[in-house]
């Protein structure tokens, strides 16, 4: 199966849906990496390179949205969520403007670029902003549809895309629905809830557990905010234990969001898999092992969660 990075899917989706004359794409001098260069080639009159000025880019995007445009603001997740947080909060979130933030190069899988570029806090930052929708697609199929859903949604959206090429976990007939999780595998002993490239690892872990006689349900929560409380609560009640897996810091991300739902609706043991410190430079595969973002570690945590029932 061919692999594709979701950042590439983002660029392709912008071109696919770019016929809409209201769509304007802004980039902070990283269009080759964020793949917005695809839109630039197709619709140069509606592409603006803002230079290395991410905060200004967010304000310009807000101004365009206030004028009736659907503004896409693109840069690396570290700069979109970190450097420009104040402008995103005050100029986009507070005003509930129709700005779509395409944040690429998120997570530890950025690899050799190291800690300064491996944004592990962006989900926590963005989901803390009222009115902000937060999406982290798992593959090419989902990423393409997520961009369309963002266009159709009236209000701010933060989309998290990866640098690393990944295999598809969804079929061609998959239908993305904003705020609705997807059960990819049924199970009765525990539930693995994952986002982004960790969804593929969750499915691998489930196969490994099956070989040991453990039945694990796998859920893809592509929309962290608004989160699908119904599918999480149902899983907690029916399987009695949950493990979350994300390429993000263990505080404030998917694990925190799922735990909030579980505590309020169906308290069960929850184990959170994610990073617990800053990243470091290295090949993605090596970093996944270093930080426990592997199917093997998911298997271990599922067993631990089941033992806590």
Image: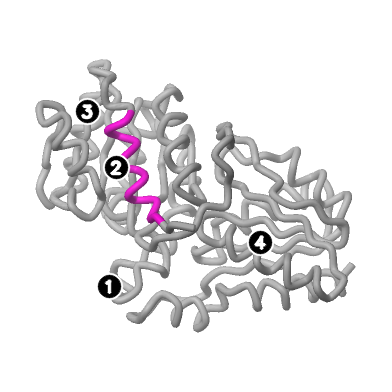
Q: Residue sitting at 80 percent across and 51 percent down? A: 186
Residue sitting at x 39%, y 57% = 162
The numbered dot on residue 283 is none
Residues rendered magenta in the picture: 4-16
Mark 3, residue position: 24
Q: Earlier in the sequence, mark 2 or mark 4?
A: 2
Q: Is residue 142 left or right of residue 254?
A: left
State the mark number for residue 11: 2
- Magenta-highlighted stretch: main secondary structure? helix
Count residues near mark 3 (Cα–Cα under 10 Å), then give few for <14, some for 14-19, many for 20+. Answer: many
Q: Earlier in the sequence, mark 2 or mark 1?
A: 2
Q: Earlier in the sequence, mark 2 or mark 3?
A: 2
Mark 1 nearby-residue class (10 Å; few <14, some 14–19, many ≥20): some
- Report which residue position mark 1 lands on: 113
Name which quarter of the figure residue 226 lies in: top right
State the image coordinates of residue 260 (x, y, percent, origin top left): 69, 50
Total numbered badges shown on the rendered structure? 4
């Amino acid at each position: 199966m061919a692999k594709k990075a979701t950042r590439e899917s983002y660029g392709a989706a912008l071109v696919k849906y770019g016929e809409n004359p209201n769509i304007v794409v802004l980039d902070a001098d990283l269009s080759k990496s964020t793949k917005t260069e695809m839109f630039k080639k197709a619709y140069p009159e509606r592409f603006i390179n803002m230079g290395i000025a991410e905060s200004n880019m967010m304000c310009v995007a807000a101004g365009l949205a206030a004028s009736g445009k659907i503004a896409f603001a693109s840069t690396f997740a570290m700069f979109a969520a970190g450097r420009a947080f104040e402008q995103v909060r005050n100029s986009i979130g507070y005003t509930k403007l129709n700005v779509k933030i395409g944040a690429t190069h998120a997570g530890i899988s950025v690899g050799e670029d190291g800690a300064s570029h491996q944004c592990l806090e962006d989900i926590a930052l963005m989901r803390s902003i009222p009115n902000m929708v937060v999406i982290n697609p798992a593959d090419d199929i989902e990423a393409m549809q997520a961009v369309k859903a963002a266009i159709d949604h009236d209000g701010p959206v933060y989309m998290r895309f990866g640098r690393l090429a990944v295999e598809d976990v969804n079929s061609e007939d998959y239908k993305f629905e904003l705020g609705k999780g997807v059960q990819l595998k049924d199970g009765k002993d525990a539930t693995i809830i994952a986002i982004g490239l960790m969804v593929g690892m969750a499915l691998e872990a489930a196969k490994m557990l099956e070989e040991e006689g453990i039945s694990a349900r796998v859920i893809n929560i592509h929309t962290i905010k608004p989160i699908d409380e119904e599918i999480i609560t149902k899983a907690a009640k029916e399987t009695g234990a949950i493990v979350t897996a994300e390429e993000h810091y263990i505080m404030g991300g998917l694990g925190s969001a799922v735990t909030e739902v579980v505590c309020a609706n169906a308290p069960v043991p929850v184990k959170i898999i994610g990073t617990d410190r800053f990243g470091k430079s290295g090949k993605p595969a090596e970093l996944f092992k270093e930080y426990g973002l592997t199917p093997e570690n998911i298997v271990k945590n599922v067993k631990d969660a089941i033992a806590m029932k």
